[in-house]
Amino acid sequence: MNVVIPTKENHMQHIIEKVRHGQRLTLEDGVFLYESDDLLTIGQLANEVNMRKNGKKVYFIENMSLYFTNVCEAHCAFCNFRKDEGEPGSYTLTGEQMIQYVEQHFHPGVREFHIVGGHNAHVPFQYYVDSLKALKAHYPDVTLKAYTAAEIDFFSRISGLTYKEVLQELMKAGLQSLTGGGAEILSDHYRKKMRVTKADVSQYLDVHRTAHELGLRTHTTMLYGSIETKEDRIRHLMHIRELQDETNGFLVFIPLSMQPINPKAGIRRRNSAFEDLKTIAISRLMLDNFQHIKAYFINIGVQLTQVALTMGASDAHGTIVKEKISHAAGALTPEGITREDLIWLIKGAGRIPVERDTFYNEIKIYE
C-alpha cells in the first residue's frame, strides 16, 4: 500500500481547499500556517475570506480612550502602565476630573468611550460604577465600552458579587459593551510565567459568556510576541472560537502586538512586520465565526495597518485621541489619528471606509 507522506506543499493546498469549502481549520493547520514562510499565500487566502464576509468595506469609529486610574494590584511582566498607590505618576480620577479631561478633547463626532484602567483595590466597586454614571450623565449619546473581563473578575472579588451581579450593576450605570483586554494569551502556563495574577483562562471566558447571556456584545484580544508558542496562539484562537460558537457574542477579534518596555528598544525586541501580518491573516482564517478582525495601528503602525487591510483585516480601529497603555510600554506609533487620516489610509488600500458605531451599525460610507 502506498502511503502519502504530507509535505509543506500539500498541507498548504489542503488548507486552501478547506477554507474555500468552508471547513474549519484545526490546531495542526494553524500551527502549520505560523511555521510557513509563505505570507503571500496566507494573506491572499485571508483576504478571500474577508472579502466574502465584508466585501471591500473597512470599518472605523470616532472614539476616545479613557483611563480613570493606573493604580493596579497586578504586576504583569509586560505592563509599564500600572503604578502602586502613592508612587510618583500614580493617579485615580474622580468622575468630575474625567469629565474635565473629556471636555478638553471632545467633539460631537465621538461615538464611543473606550474605558480601561488598573485594578485599584484602594477604592470600592462603587467607584467604578460611579465613574460610568458620571460619563453617562454628561454624554448620554456616547456608547460606554468599558472594562476588561479581568477588571470584571477584580470587581467581583472586591465586591463579593457574582460576575452577573457586577455586570448588571454596571449596565444600570450605562455599560453597553466590554473591551477585549485582559486576555493576553489564554494559557494558564503562560499566565504563571508572565505573572498574570488577574483572571485565569476559564474566568476570562466565563466573564464574556456571562456578558453575552445578559445581552452585551463584547470584544476580545490576544497579546502575542513574548514567551508563548505558536501552539499557544492557536489554542487561544480556538478558545474564543468555541465560545463564539456557544454565544455568538463577540463583535471583533483584536490581535495586539507586544510592545517592549523601553521605547528605545531595538527592532529585535519588537515583533516583525512579517509576524504581525501573519497573525492577522491566521486569525482571519482560524476565526471562521467572527465577522471582523481588527488591525490595531497603535501597535503595528499606520502603514502596516494599511497593508493588513489586504490580508484579512476589516477594521482599522478608531481615532482614540490619546492612547496610554501601549505607549507606556514603548509603542512608537501615534497616540491617536484623525478621521480624515483614517479615511485616507483605508482608501489607500483600495477599500471603502465605513464609519461605524460600537456595534458595527454603519453611520456613513465614504465612497
Image (tube, helix red, strand yellow):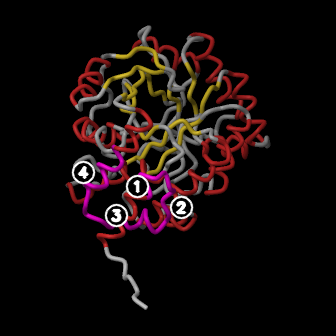
Q: Where is residue 69 in the image (x, y as percent from the top left)?
A: 53, 33
Q: Where is residue 3 in the image (x, y as percent from the top left)?
A: 40, 86
Residue position marked by numbered label 4 in the rendering? 273
Amino acid type for the residue under numbered disc 1: Tyr
Residue position marked by numbered label 3 in the rendering? 13
Amino acid type for the residue under numbered disc 3: Gln
Q: Which residue is located at x 27 percent, y 55 percent?
A: 41
N-terminal label among 1 and 2: 2
Q: Distance between the residues labelled 1 and 3?
A: 27 Å
N-terminal label among 1 and 4: 1
Residues packed near mark 2 inside 10 Å, few (<14), some (14 to 19) or many (20 plus): many
Residue that sits furthest to the top in the current view: 108
Residues packed near mark 3 inside 10 Å, few (<14), some (14 to 19) or many (20 plus): few
Residue position marked by numbered label 2 in the rendering? 191
In front: 85, or 276? Answer: 276
Q: Which residue is located at x 36 percent, y 62 percent?
A: 33
In the rendered image of this protein, does residue 45 appear above or below residue 51? below
Q: Position of residue 180 (x, y in %)?
A: 53, 41
Residue 42 included in the magenta stretch of the image: yes
Q: Which residue is located at x 51 percent, y 42 percent?
A: 290
Q: Distance between the residues labelled 1 and 4?
A: 13 Å
Residue position marked by numbered label 1 in the rendering? 224
Bounds of the magenta segment: 18-47
In what element is the residue under mark 3? Answer: helix
Mark 1 vs mark 2: give the one in front: 1
